[in-house]
Image (spheres, rainbow, N blue to C red):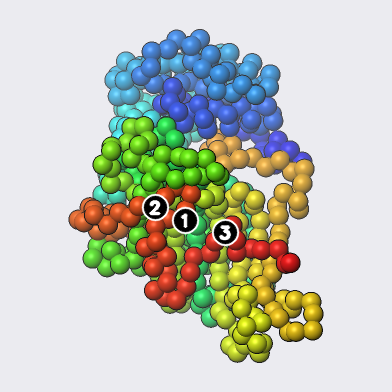
Amino acid sequence: MSAAEVLTKAPPVALVIFGASGDLTARKILPALAKLADRGTLDNGFTVVGVARTEWTDDEFRAAVHQATPDAGTRWHSLVDRFTYVTGEYTHPDTFDALRTKLADADRQDGTAGNRLFYLATIPSMFGLVAKAVADHGCNKPGPGGSFARLVVEKPYGRDLRSALELDDQVHSAFDESDVYRIDHYMGKETVQNVIALRFANAIFEPIWNRRYVEEVQITVAESLGVEHRGGFYETAGALRDIVQNHVMQVLALTLMEAPTSMDADRIRDEKVKLLQAVDIPTPDEAVDKMVRGQYTAGAIGGEAVVGYRSEPDVAPDSMTETFVALRLRVENWRWAGVPIYIRTGKRLPARVTEVALRFHQVPFLLFDKKASRDLRPNALILRIQPDEGITLEFGAKLPGEAFSVRSVAMDFAYSQAFAGVEAADGYERLLHDAMVGDPTLFIRSDEVRQAWRIVDPYLEAWADSPTGLHPYAAGTWGPHMADLLVERTGDAWRNPALDVRPLG
Ligand code: BG6
């Protein structure tokens, strides 16, 4: 089965990309569109109108598109010949007059049928202004004969709750919430969606999915890459804003929420919001005790020497931006009260791993000799989101032999084996497709974004008040030692994704 069969055909549409000459467009949006085109998912009435400040002609834009999609097939490359481009300031009336003309031309010549999808891939500070300018120039409605005009907004959606509320005001003055599609590319990942399948397609997990059986939850989003060429952006963000407020909160909500009453977009999003509303919000003073921030120094990844964060391009030599953060949260509801939720994310960690691990209680009484069972750990269920997507159940087994020695072993499920031959769409493909067909399930609703900011704001405030607690860690290690202490305070330890699942032997 190919992704063409997995995804339904999209309707005709003109996709307007603001930030068309930027990095995100070249690295993520265009390659995803090219795949959709080559799999036959895009309609013949599809085109792109690029908008950016870079002075390009239509031909120069097309050349840049071809360059960004070198592996694409003929379907895509023949579509690209019709793409057009508007050079201009994002809020200048001339830009939008030109855009209106291009959209009318596209309806007439390319069969885009009056449908519009506006994609905000500019620098985040322009999101609200561009949305408003789209509306001020009458582009926030479908063209003649069209049935939709939607706005896709990239992350980060605001820098804190206050700015997210301001952005929402601007966006809502231009588009109805039902036409706003806030992207979090983690929601486009098959394995993130599979958390829903694991939990709600199986009867055996629900009875143990709560405080009576679960001792703690750990969510890890580890990257071995550094900030690459995005130092300038990262300096304004840091790990808490870049990963925790969005990707981690989404994974947390899907893992811990109650069962929705249906797969309807709003029923799922209602449950996610309810879960986020139950996450404890400390005062900034309390937050200090529940978080650890770190910044990588020079070290080695996979045997190769790498520079420290402060030596990366576009990073201040005395930067206080965190590239690692660990938090201890609580979810205050009947299901999860008292269960510590540990979160950590960082760049330049030893491996690229995203996983959720539920560790279950110890057995009430251990029958076996302590020494002979020292390698027995409590049961754990690990949802491996990337890179080797799957599910692992750790449980105790007897080592062969006369002595009754028990140790933990792992039972593994790998998506790549179970669904060999099924080529799933990647995150951006899936989300672009869903925005075109009008399915908002995997996009972030306004109240979800706000609640996620409410949760992280106290940590940001605590940090702003006292920016000294930034702990260095060498690239290639699992973060600062202080992060271990955060977990050890409740008698636990971080899982080591590289070591904890060991083959028997
Ligand atoms: C992005 C962050 O949202 O997610 C990046 O801005 C990060 O800093 C990336 O590298 C990680 O995504 P993935 O899909 O590689 O886990």
Callout 1 crowding tier (Cα within 10 Å): few <14, some 14–19, many ≥20: many
User: 421 left or right of 54?
Assistant: right
36 or 352, which is in the foreground?
A: 352
Under circle 2, the secondary element is strand
Q: Residue at image x 56%, y 14%?
A: 82
Measured as percent of width and height from the top left, residue 151 is found at 43, 35
Q: Are marks 2 and 1 in contact (CB under 8 Å)?
A: yes
Give the number of the disc on residue 223: none
Under circle 1, the secondary element is loop
Q: Residue at image x 68%, y 22%?
A: 73
Q: Residue at image x 49%, y 15%?
A: 61
Foreground mark, 2 or 3?
2
- Pointer 1 residue: 478
Under circle 3, the secondary element is loop
- Calculate the distance from the C-alpha at mark 1 to the C-alpha at mark 3: 10 Å
Measured as percent of width and height from the top left, residue 123 is found at 35, 32
